[in-house]
Image: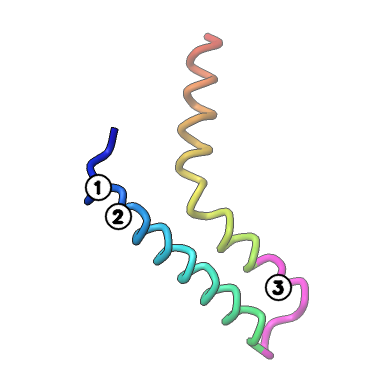
Amino acid sequence: MFENGAVIALMVLLIVLVCLWVAAVRSIVQDNRLSAEAKVGWIIAVLVAPFLGVIAWYATRSWNRSA
């Protein structure tokens, strides 16, 4: 299905994205200027934002299918 180089590249990309998510969440948690509610909001935004495009694509796809 995939070439070995493509699989390795995808794995490296996945590892880099997870590291960025961990760094972002860690930065939010350690920020003393944010309230607890603001921290939760930012953490949700950081974890959900990368998937908004996929969610929007799927939602519009299903809307168009039902019409």
Real-space Cα separation, disc 1 to disc 2, in angstroms: 6 Å
Residue in the picture at 58% in, 59% down: 47
Outermost right residue? 36
The answer to if 34 sits in the magenta stretch is: yes
Residue in the picture at 50% in, 36% down: 56
Real-space Cα separation, disc 3 to disc 1, in angstroms: 43 Å
Tag 3 residue:
38
The answer to if 10 sits in the magenta stretch is: no
* Relative depth, front residue between 47 and 42: 47
Q: Does 28 appear above or below 7?
A: below
Tag 1 residue:
4
Which stretch is magenta?
32-41
Residue in the picture at 48% in, 16% down: 64
57 to the left or right of 25: left
Real-space Cα separation, disc 2 to disc 3, in angstroms: 37 Å
Q: Position of residue 55 (x, y in %)?
A: 53, 38
Tell me the crowding category of disc 3: few under 14, some 14 to 19, or many 20 or more residues within 10 angstroms, Cα based.
few
Tag 2 residue:
8
Q: Tag 2's secondary structure? A: helix
Q: Magenta segment, principal secondary structure?
A: helix
Outermost bottom residue? 32
Q: Does 32 appear above or below 3?
A: below
